[in-house]
Image (tube, rainbow, N blue to C red):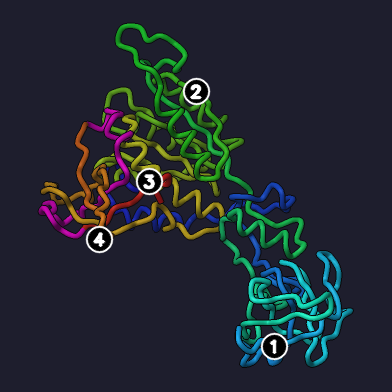
Amino acid sequence: MKGFFQLISSVEFIELFERFHPLNTETIPLADCASRILAEDVTAPEQLPPFSRSTMDGFAVRARDTFGCSESEPALLNIVGEIAMGTSGRDIALRPGQTSRIWTGGELAAKSDAVVMVEYSHLLDEHTVEIFRPVAPGENVIRAGEDTEQGQMVLARGRRLRPQDVGVLAGLGITSVTVYRRPLVAILSTGDELVSPDQQPGPGQIRDINSTTLAALVEESGGIANRIGIINDDFDTMFTACRDALSKADMVLLSGGSSVGQRDFTLQVLEHLQNSEVLAHGVAIRPGKPTILARTGNKALFGLPGHVASAMVVYYLFVLPLLHRFGGMTADQGLLPIPAITGEQIPSAIGREEYVRVELVRPADGSPPVALPIYGRSGLLTPLVKADGLLVIDRDSEGLDKGAAAKVLLFPSLS
């Protein structure tokens, strides 16, 4: 067990996630699988598209029959049929000098290998057409299997399904997929000074911001948030609430009470839960130093800082990667890093990795964005609202000069 504030690095903290494994899987209808994480590789049961099809309205031709044609010397072709939408083009087999009308999406006639756009044709009569422009084999055509060949791996395990992924599955006739179960995350806020957002705070009281913010983050990450509510700074109350939450949830986020203080019971509670193991208490980052991680079996418990800005930073750096691991993804898939240039000098203290809230200004010439720090104490909300991401300063650095190359972790809404 890591003792109180025996600081470990962020890398060492992430390495602790190797002690957790992905959640169970479930098979769900295709209509419900958007944003879910695949638990198995998906291979194509058939080719897509299933037949060669036209991408234009025009005439299906043998490309060789149009070779050398022009407006002054058009190719004359005999029209032997029309391929209506939803009918088979294989019933029409073109011979040299023959063509067939075709519409966008129609199946190519047998022996045809290209389509002449209607703009480059002129009907002499209902049986004869002039072609003014040559086409190459495959022009204006999507061939059978060009999108996906039968047996090809289409989507890999661990992929979060996007709308276009769902579309591919539908095109292949796949109506259900096996995904990892969504993690259920219980969220508790501690503090005698807290009241719910719908209440008017009394003297010395403030509304609970953390529960709402963390629940939104969990839902954004693909988890299921269960807001337990506010619990008092009392060991027995906290212990009972955590024990009950843990019996149903895969992860518990306990906000507040992880720092040094006479009534900060989080560490004691986590130590006394049945079969619990405190993996870390203290990480060399700023903000977020007093973060706690414990586990019981494959369930995780986080003690997060009480200030919402600090809690959000810890969520993005550590909670989100562990949720990804629960979902079968790699644990380092957190916020998207992008290169940036500092717009002013940003000081820092050696010994802790620092995450500075920044606003990004994107130059018109396409060069890396300029990162401008948004200063404010970790209990303030406006800097979070204005920030586009977190600029990373190494723990061995005294800060960054103006114009220095930097890495910014984009918040999801911008990534």
**173 sits to left or right of 228:** right
Q: Position of residue 88 (x, y in %)?
A: 86, 73
Mark 3 or 4, nearer chain start:
4
Mark 4 and mark 2: span between their CA atoms?
A: 46 Å
The tag on residue 229 is 2
Residue that numbered label 4 is attached to: 367
Residue 92 shows in the view: yes
Residue that numbered label 3 is attached to: 411
Work out whether 384 lies above or below 349: above
Cβ–Cβ below 8 Å for labels 1 and 4?
A: no
Mark 3 or 2, nearer chain start:
2
Label 2: element kind? strand
Asked whether 5 or 410 is in front, the reply is 410
Q: Amino acid at mark 4?
A: Ser
Label 1: element kind? strand
Residue that numbered label 1 is attached to: 75
Q: Amino acid at mark 3?
A: Phe
Mark 1 or 3, nearer chain start:
1
Mark 3 and mark 2: span between their CA atoms?
A: 26 Å
> In front: mark 1 or mark 3?
1
Q: Which residues are magenta?
A: 377-405
Sort mark 3 into few (<14), some (14-19) or many (20+) by Cα contacts within 10 Å: some
